[in-house]
Amino acid sequence: MAEETKPKKGFLGALKDIVYGMSSHEMTRHAVRTRASMEHLFILITMGDLLGIPILPPYYSLRLLPYVTPQISSWKRRMLRERDVTDVLG
Amino acid sequence: MNALIAVIMGAATVYLAYTRYARRIDRNVIQSDPKRATPATLYMDGVDFMPTNRNILFGYHFKSIAAAGPIVGAIVAANLWGWLPAMIWLVLGVAFMGWASDYSAIVLSVRNEGSSLSAVAHRLISPRTRTILFIFIFFYLLLIAGAFVGIMAQVMDSQPKTHLGMILLVAMGLLLGQMLYRWGVGLLPATALTVGIAFAAVLAGPLTEGLFKGLNEFFNSLTGGSAIVTYFDPTLAGFKGAEAKIMPSLLFWAIAICIFCYAGSVLPIWRMAQPVVYVGFWITAVAMILGLLGASLGTFIKPEVAQFQIPAFKGWNPQLGPSGIMPLWPMLFVTIACGAISGWHSLFGSVGTARQIESEADMLPVGAGAMFAEFLLGLLALLAVTVGAKGPPVAAFANGLGGFISVWGLPLEYAVSLAFATFIVIVLVVTQLIFRVMRVTLTEWLGEAIPPLRNQHVASFISVALAILLVLTGTWIYLWQLFGAANQLMAALSLLLVTIWLASVGKDWLYAGLPMIFMYVTTVGSILVTAYNLYFNVYVPNLDAGRLLPAVGSGLMVLVAVLLVVAALFIGFDGWRAFLKYLGQPAAAARAATARK
């Protein structure tokens, strides 16, 4: 995602980015947040296996675990981060 | 004086303030370092913390801070004191305070692991400061909601030509949400269809004026033409004051707006709130771009729409009603907020934008750059009301902006209709989001103690009911100034936090500290003046006349004003103690820079 890895954009590219930022970036962020909430629920149902307690039948949990594992670190960060009411503004 | 000179002066202000002052502070005081890792890169979770391109972030931040503030404030101020004081404050405010406030809030958050202002207040000042800040933020939101609903209800009631556009805007927003998220239609065709229809409806508004006028008359006939509430409005009769009435049609539009906001608050955000904002964005963007360019070129193409018509200066202390006072200091500085300096920007910048900053080198172009763009929007609003002297304040703005747009060949009547719609759209989309935030704030704040508030419908209903109660007092000019004061106080508190943080890390704090002192003293003073006006202009006459609702509403607002002052004094006292503590022995608060990979 680092900017230096991307090719430089011209004036029109910058203008396109600004218009995207004004019109659609917020919608994208909300869509991403909704997806993150769904993924948290997903992690929750497989939590038992992470802790070694079989809540779901082990067959299904083992099938699901590969999808959960890559997200554990960002999930942990989101769950443990300090929040307050002003967070909803962003 | 004409619009072209003002636009050139505005552009020069932006250039000089950005290159000669803001860049110097960024380089010498903050010492932004592109190699230092930002919270977005350090804590990237793909959701809240996400490194984002600076151009996208500029657009996102500008759109999030540019609401009704710069427009309504400029309208009210130009009518009270004339265009010259308003323009001087806009220029000096943004050059020495506004950009510093927006930029510093982002810097504060970026240098403190993406923390919100209240979290930094908790760490640097005291836990009590954080609690007071929460209470303050709730009342702040209540004031915005009340002021915006009141303004919109008045404009909708008096401008039937805007109704078709607004109804179809909401309908197109709902359709867009359905098309994008349920039917899987692409963004471009969905945008073309919904924005096209909404635009056509806005422009066709004058053709349906008679129909909606008849609807208003029908509502008013239900009470035999008599008012539901009568109150003293100090803004009538050239600010001499007179009795004003809330007619059934106005109450109908106020309730309709609240139902819309209620739905925006409780429905999934993709269903209504976001798509309506998106469709509204295109309408306002087109009107604003045509308006700004029209203001610049109007002097050559259509000079009659670009000449200033209202007086440059109307007086130091215009009287407001029989007992009210409106001294230029402190009231001008809270009446015009967002175009010069605003607390909302700091609040949003710290929790929204700062967590997406990819490189410290982006903090200045995004934070200060968006503020300077907002200043240009405020300047456009001021120009519009200054050249369009016909009618009451909002109508003057719409006439002025319509005149600028008509430079491009659109008939004046349709251009004015577009300008009215632009005003309502800007206020409407912000208001529905504010009710959503209010609902969440109320639940977070009191949900533990009062379990029913955890229910989103109960929390939303209470938020809407409180706003309606404020609206029914009918004194939106006070509500606006109380909101302006709360907003500016938020900016002062944000600058206070920045000042304390700068002292805590041993940096030069003057660039934030001096504007903070000015804004703090000014806003506390303005709240006291507003409370005085509310008490003597609204509360006492209505109580004497036995009109219960305006008396209760204005009494409630006096109470809110007193609470704001008390909150400001507590935070100021705690902040001063923390400042002295850090000034004596700067703490090792500055974390060691974490190198990028």
Image (cartoon, coloured by chain):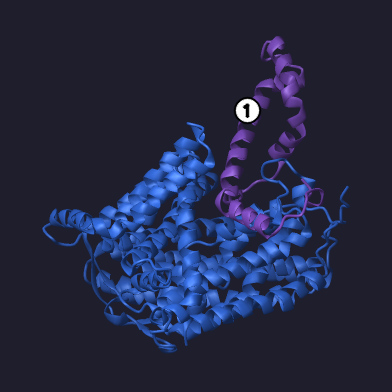
**Front one among A78 and B582:** A78
Q: Position of residue B362 (x, y in %)?
A: 74, 60
**Front one among B365 and B49:** B365
Estimate how packed mark 1 is, as few (under 14), some (14 to 19) or many (20 or more) residues with alpha carbons within 10 Å. few
Q: Is the residue B180 above or below the residue B565 in the image?
A: above
User: Chain B, which colour?
Assistant: blue
Residue identified by numbered label 1: A41
* Kind of residue sitting beneath label 1: Leu
User: Chain A, which colour?
Assistant: purple
Choose top left, top right, bottom left or bottom right for residue B212: bottom left
Q: Position of residue B260 (x, y in %)?
A: 37, 47
Left or right: residue B313 compared with residue A52: left
Chain to which the residue tagged by mark 1 belongs: A
- Decide if residue B169 is in sight here: yes
- Decide if residue B460 is in sight here: no
**Front one among B61 and B411:** B411
